[in-house]
Amino acid sequence: MEEIQNKIRREVVQLLSEGQVDVVIGFEQGSLPLRATPFFLRDIADANRLVWSPFCENNLATYLTKIQGKRVGLIAKGCDVRSVVALLVEKQIHRDHIVIIGVPCQGMVDRRRIEREVDGEILKAHQEGEEIIVEGRDFRKSLPRKEYIYPSCKRCEHRNPLIYDTLIGEKLVEEAERAYHEVEAFEKLSPDKRWSHFSEETSRCIRCYACRQACPMCYCAECFVDSSFPKWIEKGLDPSDVQFWNIVRAYHQTGRCVGCGACERACPMEIDLVYLTQKINRDVKELFGFEAGLDLDPPPPLSTYRVDDEQEFIK
Amino acid sequence: MTFIGNNAASNSHESLRNPYLPFPMRVERTFVETSDRMLKSFDLAFVDKVDEAAFRFRPGQFCEVSLFGKGEAPLGIASSPTEKPLLKFTVNRAGVVTRALHHLEEGDEVGIRGPLGNSYPVDRFQGKNVVIIGGGFAFTTLRSLVVFMLDHENRKKFKEITVIYGARAPGLLLYKEELAQWEKREDVNLYVTVDKGDEGWNGREGFVPTVVEEVGPSSENAYAVICGPPIMIKFTFPKLADLAFPRERIYTALERRMKCGMGKCGRCNIGPLYVCKDGPVFSYAQLEELPKDY
Amino acid sequence: MKKLPKEKVKPFVEKLLQDYEVLGPMETAGFASFGRIMSPGELKLNYQNSKKTPKEAFFPQWEVMFRYRSTGQSVEVKSAEDTGRRRILFGIRPCDIRAALLLDLVFDSLDFKDPYYINKRKGTIVVGLGCNHPASTCFCTSVNGGPFSREGADFFMTDLGDGYLVEVLSQKGRKLLRGFDGKEASEEDKERAKAIADSATRGISSVIEADGLMEKLEKLTEAPFWDFLHEKCLGCGICTYLCPTCHCFDMADEAFDLKGQRVRCWDSCLFPLFTLETSGHNPRPTGRERIRQRIMHKFNYFFYTHKAIACVGCGRCIIHCPVNLDIRRVIDDIHRE
């Protein structure tokens, strides 16, 4: 880790001093245990603030559509790079404005799961080999890193960045869990159980839109929830509105979601709707043989038409 | 409109008048002001005598006008208190509520909350010369101010009154009847201008800032009030500065996305001041102290 | 002062439930939230700060203001104010009580009274619960609060381990002693409570420098500082919605054919739509202006109007920010500017 971190710093210093980029987006040490925080680096004197750790959980590609007009160096995990590819395919960013510093990713640590493993507040955390050590007022606990990475990381099939300008560190062996097991498990439930799961999860939604804001693909200039003319949805917490929001948000990702898990990580209410995006991802794969963020060439299936497209659904 | 309020008697604490509940007013007259039909005036009459008696306002104040099912829009009161019992609102067709308001017919009812906000400092204007500069459809509360000052009871309280009003085209001038009446009066200097005239127009042509320069109203013992599109204000303000109007004696009225109208909902503030409650009328000296959040 | 042994809490709360609607900390989906409890077993009193705040008791995220019904050209309007509800906020932390006192300044101001808030607030008895183990993110003592501050409580409890030390602080609080089956607290209990409070207060490890902050911000309104502060902010509403003092709201009509309702719901200064005008003009067009608004409102504008900082140091915005944008660091940076 430390070696990777040092390489990242050296690479970034070079990029900035050669004037190849205006800003580098990476991570610095967070203010809380188990956290790193996005860092916009402009001055090479600050390069030693850059960190690389199992706590770099944010998808930094989300900033690319917000920081237009600048040449950006992006420190990018496998999923961040998939988002970059998806944004390039949708022509939201320019490839020559971005320098991708790819970093193979071993998975990011699920801080909430770790917090639930201990009684009391975690005051310190660090990695020691393959263990995450957490310490509190009257405890110290060691947890195997691999078991505590985010579910989306466990499913990840592309830990190695697919495209990059520089790759930091060695490529990893891809070892994903079965890709769609959450939606498969969900499909086995009775309709009543599915409905109650969905309505219970969404009942916690406070409509803070953190899921939307964290998602690199949610870049619409005006989100449908914000439109007043026409008005598609009320602003309150009526279950029908909250459910409508969550469904449409997921479905607008059809053929676009890279499965990075940023929406789930951002959600303060820990709402589990991953099976929704998984379902659409699986459908798109089965119907069109397409997975978002893997390839720069084919247009996304929902923005193009081919005569041999699957048409079962309109019969 | 019938109002069934809560039964306060069951409460242990004192009952409160609910400032969020609109009261009813009926549309007495509608009038299309401009040739592009984007601006329409509505004269409203109080349905309830109690509401009428309680409604005391001054030029520059606004109301939240409700169309149930659509929402509320903050609209400056275009009529003068001297014209009571009717209230006039001039509505630019722009958003959800104002589009729907344009469909109102005589006899329809709307909900009103207000009067809200501060007002033009008419007390401070007493014994002074007053220069009123307006552009486009921002002339609504200026109409209220002019009619108020020209009222026969009030006129003597003010010295010279100068009104400079401009629109892009003759058809886009508001309140043409009043303008014609003011034109005839000796006790008001009226300068109406349009950016570009048409065949029927034999009046002045030119932008408001230029006319201000030409007219050159004296800043001595004088106040100025200026309302209009940002671009007009941007170029007129230096002209007033050239005429030596100090910032404390130039007033403007701001527009914001005001919702509650009472300084609670939090969106219309500029620095620590709420446009809905501490405004909408501010002096330039005040604005200078505030963050440039507008 | 009385003492309520732990085994007597259940019958005490049961008695309260007979006469009052009781809202308290409970566990939902693995985290503490405030909600209406139907039985004492639902209470989870050994919580650190709840995720959602008890401000919802007075200022719910979404509420109906009035209902209307069209009848020809006229409209019938019926207010939906809450009245006559008898409620207890049970086990609320001192920081959240202070937040309610700050919200009182807004909703119960001299010029305009907000009946929706006031009716709920006045009908509620506040049972405070001292904070034995403040979190590392808590900085209440920097903003005129404290883990055992009694300010604003009608009734206050200190967890002594085997029971609660109970103090009645107002006439409203006294009503709760009916049906109270505790004994007088011993001198030892009182001393223990004091020791717990002292230790908790000493245990607050986070600090913000509130002195001079208002003046400092006054000079910083147009500083380049804001150009960079907002960069990593995602622009979501978490910090505002989980903040116990944020109170911005929107009003909207929900129409169903000829009848409908006007509702109000929380809104956030971090959303672009918050200030977007019909013309398309937005006075706060980017994250720069929006995050400045949030910081300035809490630490400057609110102080200007109400002579208090609109932050109680509960740390929720620190814990729950998805990008770890930490208000403590922001304040440090402001002082360094």
Image (cartoon, grey):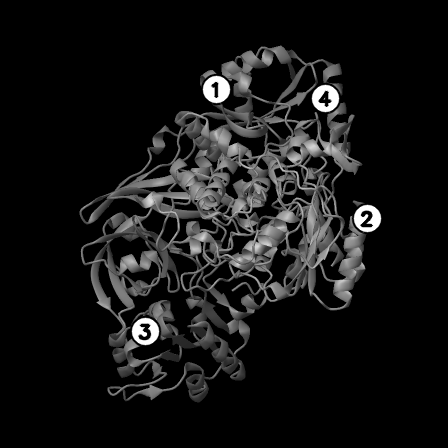
Q: Which residue is mark 2?
A: A3
For the residue labelled by badge 3, is the local secondary structure a helix, a strand or a loop? helix
Question: In which quadrant of the rendered image does the C terminus of chain C lie?
Answer: bottom right
Q: Are marks 3 and 1 in contact (CB under 8 Å)?
A: no
Which image quadrant for residue B17?
A: top left
Location of residue A21 in the rendering, given as x and y in whole percent from the top left corner: 70, 65
Query: How many angstroms separate mark 4 from mark 2 (CA)?
Result: 51 Å
- Let me know if marks 4 and 1 both belong to one chain: yes
Q: Quadrant of residue B133?
A: bottom left
Q: Are marks 1 and 2 in contact (CB under 8 Å)?
A: no
Mark 1 vs mark 2: give the one in front.
Answer: 2
Residue A50: percent from left, percent from top: 76, 52
Q: Residues within 10 Å of mark 2 (few under 14, many from 20)?
A: few
- Front label number (3 vs 4): 4
Residue for badge 3: B150
Circle 1 chain: C
What's under tag 1, amino acid-wise?
Answer: Met
Q: Cα distance, mark 3 to mark 1?
A: 66 Å
The type of residue carrying mark 3 is Leu
On screen, B163 above or below A55?
below
Q: Is residue A112 above or below residue C220?
A: above
The residue under label 4 is: C193
Name the secondary structure under disc 2. helix
Q: Is residue C140 visible?
A: yes
- Give amino acid for label 2: Glu
Marks 4 and 1, how far apart at CA: 29 Å
The image quadrant that residue A248 belongs to is top left
Residue C126 in the image, given as x and y percentages of width and height: 55, 28
Q: CA distance from mark 1 to mark 2?
A: 56 Å
